[in-house]
Amino acid sequence: MRRRTVAVLGLVALALVAAACAPNATQSALEPKGPYAQKSFDLFVPVFWVAVAIFVIVEGLLVLFVFRYRHRKRQAARIPAQVHGNTRLEIAWTILPTLILAGVAVPTVATIWDLAAKPTGDVLEVNVLAHQWWWEFDYPGQQILTANELHIPTGRPVYLTLCAVGFGYGAPVPSQGGPPAPNACQTGPPDSQPPAGIGAAVIHSFWVPELAGTQDVVPDLTNHLTIQADEPGVYQGQCKEFCGLSHAYMRFRVVAHTPEDFDRWVAEQRAPASPDVTGPAEDGKAIFLQTCVACHAVAGLETANGQPVLANGGPNLTHLMSRDCFRGCTLAMTDANLRRWIENPRAVEAGSFMPDYGLSPDEVDQVVAFLNTLE
Ligand code: CUA
């Protein structure tokens, strides 16, 4: 029995150690890579050591007393000196914790206010729309709408407005390039509630540990968060609040560029996709216009009756190939993954809102060929 307990404990310890070897091991709030994450970290470190000191003192005394005054058969009558009602002690252990808590509260409240303040000066604003189970990034005034990859310039605060979005119904409309709505996250009048079986907006939480603390994304609430990266690089993020079946697959990444590279990225993203395609991609485009357009937008593409293709619940695919990942940034952008995803979305993502159109393998290949032209 004891051996079994040891084995179980050993396995648990091994699992914990193995978890530290995950490919996203850099996803650590203890390695801040920007001023906003640094502020949280600078608060965390002293509070942590204060807590460690208190823990060691309190637990040390507890263990000491447990041993020292434990029940012994021959010394049944050994009762320690009683301090009940000792005024000095009572005052001391009331005042001391009050002072410690006050000492912790002052920098904590100051940091909360500091982080909550809207940054001034040269600020990039991005609307973040949290869907089940992917992230949409809308750059107001820039005609850029992308998914799962948030591109930012280094050395510049990025002020995020975060909204929770349902599937098509009662969803805040991305600015599609216009100015942000005054209440960006208002999901419309109560009668726009989704019909049964359609995804409602639920609570998510936005977290890029290396760049900032977490911020919940709550239906009908407009929340904000400021992030900033000092150095170019890729910073892993994820949804940190259980939001349904595929919550664990709701990842994203923040790609920080030098200001020059960021301007280049903006110019590329603003260009429309080339709608003129040939070969299998042309067949794929026809299939796309019959099925995928129900949810996915491609700027520059028109339906058979001349309507622009606008987003309706699914990620904007205009520059799909400029992204390295898809499906909540859990799949690398490869033909094999795209094929697997289109063939049977629910086999890849539990509870997926993406329907299986029952395309033949050839048709799937044609759609993938078309997607490959969306650079
Ligand atoms: Cu979104 Cu968890």
Image (tube, helix red, strand yellow):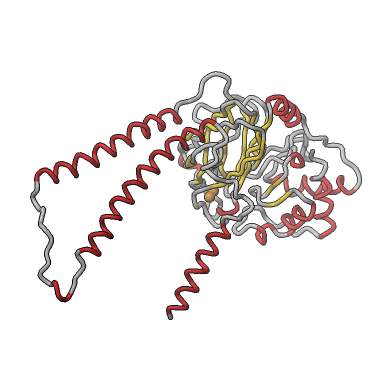
Q: Name the residue rendered at 68%, 25% in the picture.
A: 259
Q: Residue furthest top?
A: 121
Q: Can you say whether 270 is above or below 98 in the image?
A: above
Q: Nearer the viewer, residue 184 or 230?
A: 230
Q: Name the residue at 73% across, 55% down.
A: 342
Residue furthest out toward the front: 74
Left or right, residue 230 beside residue 268: left
Q: Give the position of the C terminus as an image quadrant.
A: top right
Q: Is residue 222 shown above or below 372?
A: above
Q: Please, which residue is most extreme toward the bottom here?
A: 1
The residue that appears at 43% across and 81% down in the rendered structure is: 1
Question: Relative to residue 122, is residue 48 depicted above or below?
Answer: below
In this picture, is 18 found above or below 263? below
User: Would you identify the image quadrant in which residue 160 lies?
Assistant: top right
Residue 43 drawn at (x, y percent): 42, 36
Q: Is residue 319 left or right of residue 245?
A: right
Left or right: residue 355 versus residue 92 is right
Q: Position of residue 334 (x, y in %)?
A: 77, 50
Camera-side residue: 279 or 291?
Answer: 279
Residue closest to the eye, 305 or 126: 126
In front here: 307 or 253? 253
Report how many numbered discs are placed on residues in the image.
0
Residue located at (70% from left, 57% from top): 356
Residue 153, quarter of the rendered image? top right
Q: Position of residue 49 (x, y in %)?
A: 39, 43
Residue 84, position as x, y percentages in the image: 10, 53
